[in-house]
Amino acid sequence: MSGSFDYVGWIVIPSLQMGVVVCAIWARSFLRFFPLNFYMLVATLFTAARFFTMVQYGVRSSQYFYFYFYSDALLTICLFFALMCLFSHVFQEMGARIYIRIGAILVIGLISAVSYGMVRQAQDKMVTNFAAELSQNLYFVGAVLSYVLWVAIRKLRETRTQLIQLVLALGVYFSAFAASYALSVLYPNSLVWRLVSYAMAIWLPLAWGYTFLRIPEGARLTTARVALGSR
Amino acid sequence: MITALIFGLSIVALLQFFVSYCRSLIAATGALPLSQQVREVTGIRDGEISGAEFARLLQLARLCPEPGKDRSSIAAVRGYYTLLSAVRAVSGRFIPGVVSWTERELSRCAHFAAVTLDRRITYCRGLMAQQLSN
């Protein structure tokens, strides 16, 4: 993690993440999509904190290792709440906001319990394994829930372009991470997951930043023209 | 076994999301007509633009100064174009319906590139007018 490529990542990725927040403020969408912006702010802070931990203790230190996995688990939870924010935007007219909040807390609790159950055997490394397992499971559930939301958007004939693009960009992010984690289990020595994490760390801020900056709040789009398989 | 299944499902979902995202970018420009200026520069006549024009149109767009807002969308659509070309090359021989669908999608990508070029030329002209007035 100390090549010149990584150092570029340390600068470019937080800049892009902060760029999303600036774009959202510029487009007056900061509060409307607060959980998304909160995630970007926290991600910027954690990236900076990871960098300082790496400089202070070294990339192979246990401090960096622990911090990396804990911060990743917390970031995934933040992103999960960002997804719930998109759910509540889509189901806004049905007045389902409270049910979505309860559902989100239940799902997080369930995933945590399942993750704990999976790592319970390894007592010596349980805490770290739990953080890593929780992240992996949240990515997969995030991908599934993004897909459910995308299906709901199509069925409800949602037309808000901004919302559609935010959901699709998040779907790409979650499913890419879920695939790369699965690949890292199948081929533990593969470096693909590292490339994917870099590509996705750049993808999400770029896609969200573009949506906030270029797509006006009132823009409309027919989902039938967007979904795969349509003409 | 379960991991392989998760991997397969995630890849399918990833493709669906990526294709839909790119199509949402392209759909936003699909209804926009091309200016006379761009038609003259590129030699495009009325009617659908061929998908093969995509690379040339993007090269022309690269010659213009960037407004700095469209780089990420161009990168995504370029990725989609590459994916479509690969799909056409691989499955085009076995599934004839795929060829016409990919041709239509490639043509929409080319239209997106033409609209991008149009925007950049307009931006460039604006800059020139600003400099002249100063």
Image: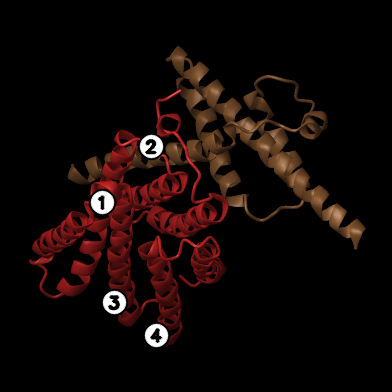
Chain colours: A red, B brown
State which tag comes first along the sequence, 1 or 4: 4
Q: Quadrant of residue A200?
A: bottom left
On screen, residue A144 above or below A62: above
Please determine if labels 3 and 2 lie on a single subunit.
no
Q: Which residue is mark 4?
A: A57
User: Is B34 in front, or is A116?
Assistant: B34
User: Element type at marker 4?
Assistant: helix
Residue A41: % across, % down: 43, 71
So how many labels did they put on this image?
4
Q: Which residue is mark 1?
A: A140
- Identify the disc placed on residue A66: 3
Q: Does A47 sit left or right of A127 as displayed?
A: right
State which tag comes first along the sequence, 4 or 3: 4
Q: Does B129 sit left or right of A95 as displayed?
A: right
Q: Which residue is mark 2?
A: B16
Cα distance, mark 1 to mark 4?
32 Å
Q: From where the camera sits, is residue A6 visible?
A: no
